[in-house]
Image (cartoon, rainbow, N blue to C red):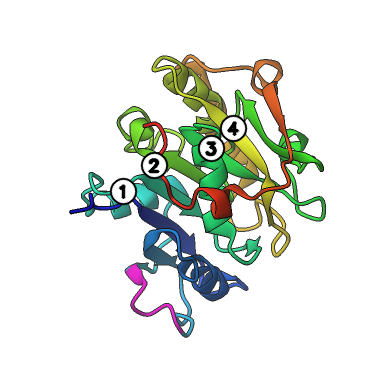
């Protein structure tokens, strides 16, 4: 009798019904994969109608605005994470290539990354140019994985990063603390260049206050051990693009851990 596959993935996202978003298309793209068993749950925040196709996937409806990582913690509080190999967090304004999740998680597994993000395409809004896609590169082991628009946390990182620290409610600053928390356990971080996302629908920081959020980040970082920008934006190792696709070669073959 074969052993059960360790291939369950929890995907959590937050969308704003009152503004243009790609949540319905993102859902279709994520659920179209065939290598992983996906459990997808959205929180809808603010006024507006739930888009077609998102009714059953929207498990939390909030009319009042709440910071993103506080919402994610509310979603996580209702979930037993033990069956899941990966937690993937997505924003509602990204565009994914066909078969994105199969390939992305195959690369994350192949390079043994506890925390990983896709690079951003060159026509995206980019907050930190360090995460812009490098052509000819499959992945990079780094000291930095940004808080959005997509990141993936493997099971061995759950206890270290979850629940999310709500002293950084919009997440600003978490990505400079996470490397310290994960490094203490010998965990690896990385950027996947061969499976990028496009983040171009909405200009960043248009749905919340920049000054208030920036001040909250400064307070958050002042109380915690964290990396500087110079220390964070470093590629420890770069992996050239291979002709073969790990998603085809290995499927969801378990990797460490």
Badge 1 is on which residue? 6
Check if mark 4's residue and mark 3's residue have beta carbons within 8 Å. no
Helix, strand or loop at mark 3:
helix
Expressed as whole percent of the image width and height from the top left, the position of residue 158 reads: 33, 35
Which numbered disc, 4 or 3, marks the residue closer to the eye? 3
Q: Residue 64 falls in which quadrant of the image?
A: bottom left
Expressed as whole percent of the image width and height from the top left, the position of residue 166 reads: 38, 37
Relative height, residue 168 to residue 225 (above, below)? below
Q: Earlier in the sequence, mark 3 or mark 1?
A: 1
Q: Which residues are magenta?
A: 53-59
Determine if the magenta segment contains residue 56: yes
Check if mark 1's residue and mark 2's residue have beta carbons within 8 Å. yes
Badge 3 is on which residue? 110
Relative height, residue 67 to residue 57 (above, below)? above
Badge 2 is on which residue? 254
Expressed as whole percent of the image width and height from the top left, the position of residue 132 reads: 76, 42
Q: Earlier in the sequence, mark 4 or mark 3?
A: 3
Which numbered disc, 4 or 2, marks the residue closer to the eye? 2
- Closest to the observer, 49 or 255: 255
User: Crowding at label 3, few (<14), some or many (≥20) Cα neighbours within 10 Å?
Assistant: some
Helix, strand or loop at mark 1:
loop
- How far apart marks 4 and 1 lie (CA) works out to 22 Å
Badge 4 is on which residue? 190
Relative height, residue 50 to residue 76 (above, below)? below
Check if mark 2's residue and mark 3's residue have beta carbons within 8 Å. no
Left of 31 or right of it: where is 209?
right
Expressed as whole percent of the image width and height from the top left, the position of residue 232 reads: 64, 21
């Amino acid at each position: 009798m074969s052993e059960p596959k360790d291939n369950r993935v929890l995907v959590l996202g937050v969308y704003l019904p009152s503004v243009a978003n790609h949540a319905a298309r993102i859902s279709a793209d994520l659920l179209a994969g065939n290598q992983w068993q996906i459990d997808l749950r959205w929180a809808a925040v603010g006024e507006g109608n739930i888009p077609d196709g998102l009714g059953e996937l929207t498990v939390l409806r909030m009319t009042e605005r709440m910071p993103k990582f506080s919402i994610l913690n509310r979603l996580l509080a209702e979930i037993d994470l033990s069956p899941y190999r990966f937690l993937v967090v997505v924003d509602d304004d990204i565009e994914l290539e066909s078969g994105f999740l199969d390939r992305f998680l195959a690369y994350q597994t192949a390079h043994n990354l506890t925390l990983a993000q896709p690079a951003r395409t060159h026509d995206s809004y980019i907050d930190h140019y360090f995460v812009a896609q490098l052509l000819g590169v499959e992945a990079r082991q780094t000291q930095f994985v940004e808080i959005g628009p997509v990141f993936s946390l493997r099971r061995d990182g759950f206890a270290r990063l979850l629940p999310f620290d709500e002293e950084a409610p919009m997440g600003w600053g978490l990505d400079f603390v996470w490397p310290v928390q994960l490094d203490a356990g010998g965990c690896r971080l990385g950027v996947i260049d061969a499976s990028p996302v496009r983040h171009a629908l909405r200009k960043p920081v248009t749905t919340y206050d920049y000054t208030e959020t920036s001040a909250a980040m400064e307070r958050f970082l002042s109380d915690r051990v964290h990396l500087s920008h110079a220390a964070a934006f470093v590629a420890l190792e770069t992996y050239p693009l291979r002709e073969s696709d790990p998603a085809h070669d290995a499927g969801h073959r378990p990797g460490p851990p």
